[in-house]
Image: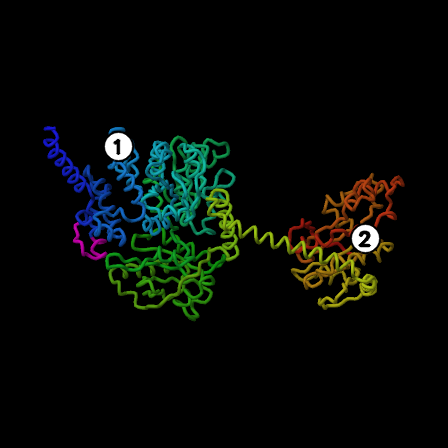
Amino acid sequence: ADMAPRRRPLLLLLVLLAAALRAAAQLDPYAVLGVRRGCSQADIKKAYKRLAREWHPDKNKDPGAEDKFIQISKAYEILSNEEKRANFDRYGDAGESQGYSQHRQFHHFHEGFYFDESFFHFPFNSERRDTSDEKYLLHFSHYVNEIVPDSFKKPYLIKITSDWCFSCIHIEPVWKEVAQELEVLGVGIGVVHAGYERRLAHHLGAHSTPSILGLINGKITFFHKAVIRENLRQFVENLLPGNLVEKVTDKNYIRFLSNWKKENKPHVLLFDHMPLVPLLYKLTAFAYRDYLSFGYVYVGLRGTEELSSQYNINVYTPTMMVFKEQIDKPADVVQARDMKKQLIDDFLSQNKFLMAARLTSQKLFQELCPVKKSHRQRKHCVVLLTREGDKFSEAYEAFLTFAVANTKDSLRFVHIYNDRQPEFADAFLGDDEKYQGKSAVVILERRNDAGRVAYKTLEEAWQGSREDNFILLDLLDQLRTDPSFLSSDAVLTDLNDELAPMFLIRWFYSTLDYISDCWDSLFHSNWREMMPLLSLLFSALFILFGTVIVQAFSDSSDARDSPPAEKEETTTKAEKNDTSFSKESNSRVPKKGFVEVTELTDINYNSNLVRLRPGHMNVVLILSNATKTSLLQKFALEVYTFTGSSSLHFSFLNLNKHREWLEYLLEFAQDAAPIPNQYDKHFLERDYTGYVLALNGHKKYFCLFKPPRLGDEGGTLGACEDYESSLHTEARGKSSCSPGSRSLKNKLHKLSFWMERLLEGSLQRFYIPSWPALD
């Protein structure tokens, strides 16, 4: 009993000491940044930038610099967010904002039961966990403003984690090893704490922890395999486009290097003894894909000996070469046994442009000819205004030679095609006749981003002569001593992007990306969130299916209730078509129940086929005297719905008159009519009635429709072989399936489906060298 009063002061002292320690451990963002409580956001941002530069671990070698930098970042995160700042000012703790409530709830639970977590060494509390992820932590504004734009230069591997997550602890060693390995290669690493950054986790689509995702070109892809080193490396590699690096051998290296003119880029060759392209090289190719084209040479592969010998490659040391306008020798070379990312970046950043690059876009113009920022940072551009063709090649080669000999840090040489950038050329040359049909040289300096430039044009056209070289060299010497030498000024409009893909191509790729995202979301997203979309989709499908069923029953009932007179009228109209087939007319406006078909003869052969206008096709039915009436009637019914197209013409060819012409044509379609040999005595007896040819006279190709197999027509002749094999047995008199017993109209069965594929352009095309004469 006497001991209890003595213990009370001691217990009270321990409680006060614990409270003091907790208050001391509490982060005061104002003290960390050194600003007063009522300061503005501009003062906070200014203080943060100053301290971040001072304590950044890459610049400050103090052992505590990393911890200090993390405190500065946390302090700025609190004070830059008005809600977190208000909570700190009100409660002395920013944890009242999103994400902190869960952590505080568990903390209070521990305090209520006097639970000492450190005794059991539980790593769930974020304050006691491994701090290796601290430098990778992301918050929402940082992700949107910096990480997403940077993902167009390098891929990011991002982990979503949280406290009290057993799986997060389980994958921690593998994640730490892979993160360090990939970061050295140039992969961005990020960590999102779902408890503190719930908004960012929801934005990324992470519904559970741990989650790992990749970010490239602003697109998110989730990782769904086991978390092991090989899978994570392969996941990052699969994020990259597949056409970044081209495999180069003795057979294709000249073509690869010669593409510099078409692509307007230097070309890079990496020689290495690895059979597969290293991930470091793929990441480098992705980062510099807008400036350089990359090729890889596996020196251990047979077929690369000539390439290695020509450029004197050491097969035991990785070698990187940059080729510009000259492909017979590299513009720059680097060799190193251990090719590091920093070495590659330094090497490629100095060789991003050709010696005399062609201005193909406004972005390239701004990079090659930047705006003057100060007197010491002047950048002048020497521009050759020329045209394409052999006539101007000599002037360009002379300009390139001059550029190679006189390139400096403050001087860039470029050229431009007047016909592709007419507004640019007109701003300097105008209508001056002495430059008509000739090349010209302009020295310019960009004054601002609005397009204003100061320039000086050579008084005479550029011919590339020795005198022209002396004149240009003298002007550059004057410019170095007197910047006001550029006396003329102009305002330029933005350049056209010559290498930009067409709108339809961009739309196609955007559609593919959207479909891919939907497919990935369908199988890997939270099904509870997908339920509204799935409900809407199935509702639309149910309504569509019901409409089709109702329409089908409605059409069948109308057909049963229609009087027989309609059938007679249809037959009469089809018979009238037979009398009008021989008439020729330029009108393509179809009449109801009427199809105009002309016979293809030697008189109208040139006009209806050989000299047919581009984009027009002649659909020709093959028939004989005996099958003319019945086949024409069926042909008219099958193609009537396509007569509204002004690019389609309809004709028929009499097999009795022009069999030889048809057989010559079918020799180019081997699957339709195999080329006969001299021993095939039954070839001339082959029956081609019912064949339909779609002839494109301008491009010299045709598409072929063959009558369907007899076994597909309902079963009356199902025991017969296919159509062509039955022709041989018919000629020998051994077939029970003769043409007389066969329904001629069934030969054109499914012709309408074939016509639809014809208009879609999905039919096989058979090309011929020239159209044969029709005798």
The stretch in magenta equals: 34-46
501 or 66: nearer the viewer:
66
Residue 219 pos. (x, y %): 43, 48
Residue 532: x, y in percent? 50, 51
**Which residue is situated farthest in the right direction here?**
733
Q: Residue at x 42, y 54 (%)?
A: 397
Q: Marks 1 and 2: CB-CB under 8 Å?
A: no
Residue 421 lies in the magenta stretch: no
As helix, strand or loop, the secondary structure at mark 1 comes to helix
Q: Residue at x 67, y 58 (%)?
A: 698
Q: Is residue 169 left or right of residue 35?
A: right
Above or below residue 492? Residue 8 is: above
Q: Nearer the viewer, residue 760 or 329?
A: 760
Residue 11, by quadrant, is top left
Question: Helix, strand or loop at disc 2?
Answer: helix
| Residue that badge 1 annotates | 117
Q: How crowded is the residue under tag 1: few (<14 C-alpha within 10 Å), some, or many (20+)?
A: few
Magenta segment: does it hold 44? yes
Image quadrant in which the N terminus is located: top left
Instruction: Give, as a three-letter code, the residue at label 1.
Output: Glu
Q: Quadrant of the C terminus?
A: bottom right
Instruction: Tell me which amino acid carries mark 2.
Output: Lys
In the image: residue 26, left or right of residue 164: left
Q: Residue at x 78, y 46 (%)?
A: 713
Q: Nearer the viewer, residue 499 or 578?
A: 578
| Residue 226 higher or lower than 554, as above or below | above
Neighbourhood count class around disc 2 (C-alpha, 10 Å): few under 14, some 14–19, many 20 upward: some
Separation of marks 1 and 2 at Cα, in angstroms: 88 Å
Return the x and y of residue 275 as percentages of the image width and height. Answer: 46, 32
Q: Earlier in the sequence, mark 1 or mark 2?
A: 1
Say which residue label 2 marks: 745
